[in-house]
Image (cartoon, rainbow, N blue to C red):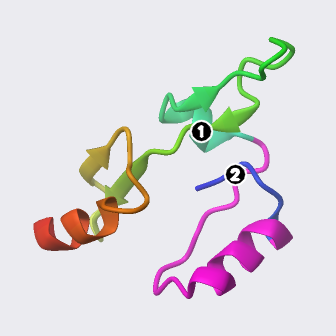
């Protein structure tokens, strides 16, 4: 999930060839609901970006795992091992 625009998130998804969809949270409602807001450096927006956190949601809608912080280099292998 990212607060980036849909087009930017689509390009990121395609670049890294993810086998799963990414959520574009342009209104920041999910970012706020999960409590993963990062404020703007100048303090102008308390929810300027979303933190790099990975939340795995099962088919039943329940949160299976939350990785905070998430290491983009080593995290995917660890997550796949857990799944």
Q: Residue at x 38, y 39 (%)?
A: 69
> What residue did someone put label 1 on?
31
Q: In the rendering, at what x and y percent does residue 2 appear?
A: 65, 53
Highlighted range, magenta: 7-27
Q: As drawn, is 77 to the left or to the right of 3?
A: left
Q: As drawn, is 59 to the left or to the right of 33?
A: left
Q: Residue at x 67, y 86 (%)?
A: 14
Between residues 39 and 41, which one lies in front from this camera angle? 41
| SS state under label 2 | loop
**How far apart, in angstroms, are the residues tagged by discs 2 and 1?**
7 Å
Dot 2 crowding, Cα within 10 Å, few <14, some 14–19, many 20+: some
Point out the residue furthest to the top here. 43
Q: In the rendering, at what x and y percent does residue 74 appear?
A: 31, 61
**Residue 31 falls in image quadrant:** top right
Task: Say above or below: 39 vs 3.
Answer: above
> What residue did someone put label 2 on?
25
Dot 1 crowding, Cα within 10 Å, few <14, some 14–19, many 20+: many
| SS state under label 1 | helix
Between residues 13 and 63, which one lies in front from this camera angle? 13
């Amino acid at each position: 999930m990212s607060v980036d625009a849909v087009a930017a998130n689509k390009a990121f998804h395609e670049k890294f060839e993810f086998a799963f969809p990414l959520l574009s949270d342009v209104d920041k409602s999910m970012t706020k609901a999960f409590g993963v807001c990062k404020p703007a450096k100048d303090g102008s927006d308390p929810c300027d970006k979303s933190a790099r956190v990975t939340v795995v949601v099962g088919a039943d809608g329940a949160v299976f795992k939350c990785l905070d912080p998430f290491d983009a280099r080593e995290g995917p292998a660890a997550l796949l091992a857990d799944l």
